Amino acid sequence: MGIISRGFGGRRRESVPGLPPGQYLTHDFPVLSAGPTPRIPLDRWRFTVTTETGDKTSWNWTEFQALPAEDVTVDIHCVTKWSKLGSTWRGVSLDTLLADVESAADYTMVHSFGGYTTNVPMEDLLDGKAWVAYKFDGEDLEPEHGGPARLLIPHLYFWKSAKWVNGIQLMPEDEPGFWEAAGYHMYGDPWREQRYQGD
């Protein structure tokens, strides 16, 4: 006598358009962080772009809020296998932040309050692909989700969308950030399931 009944196929993943392989759909917004949640007063917040030659361009919160902002609706995908479809954000495009920065760098290292880092190729930040977001679903971004501002790069796994972002360093060569040095994939494409080194 069989232990498994005929026709039993186990738990099936939802078949949802827009869901990368290996992902499941969630309707809430799970909170995952590499460390404690920093609380950054807005009068201390600053975002700085540092070129490969050491030139710096920075904005305080008031200056950042005065920049042209965009409302975007995107799908987000976490390396821990959840996906949230149709999430709405407001933020400043990296095209805007890098428009007047002179650089020949092909790579970047994103830095956050609290010391977190992640590497992102320059081309993945430009042409309407990335934002520094400060609102989610019409509300100020909560600290647990990276507020007051986080990077948003929806076409890569969400660990690349660094919480509590405070700057981007432009680099001629690629280097691993926090999770990449711990064995995560250097790029992180959800559609190619690039979760870990060797994927």
Image (spheres, rainbow, N blue to C red):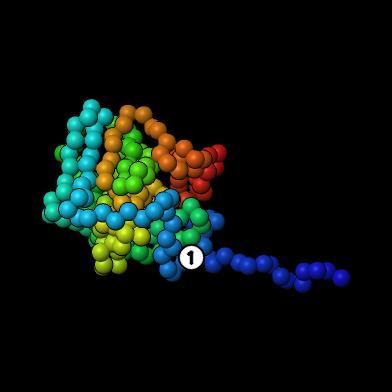
Image position of 45 (left or right of 87):
left
The location of residue 107, given as percent across then percent down, is: 34, 35
Q: Residue furthest right?
A: 1
Q: Residues within 10 Å of mark 1 (few under 14, many from 20)?
A: some
Residue 64 seen: no
- Given residues 40 and 24, the one toward you in this image is 40
The location of residue 151, given as percent across then percent down, is: 31, 50
Examine the image and state in which quarter residue 121 appears.
top left
Quadrant for the C terminus in the image:
top right
- Asked if 78 appears above or below 124 in the picture, the reply is below
Q: Residue at x 20, y 50 (%)?
A: 44
Instruction: Check disc 1 and give the amino acid type.
Output: Leu
Image position of 74 (left or right of 16):
left
- Asked if 3 appears above or below 91 in the picture, the reply is below
Q: Residue at x 36, y 29 (%)?
A: 173
The location of residue 104, given as percent across then percent down, is: 26, 30
Quadrant for the N terminus in the image:
bottom right
The location of residue 81, given as percent across then percent down, is: 51, 57
- Asked if 158 appears above or below 140 in the picture, the reply is above
- Asked if 68 appears above or below 103 in the picture, the reply is below
Look at mark 1 in the image and give the residue it sits on.
25
Q: Residue at x 42, y 36 (%)?
A: 176
- Helix, strand or loop at disc 1? strand
Residue 28 seen: yes
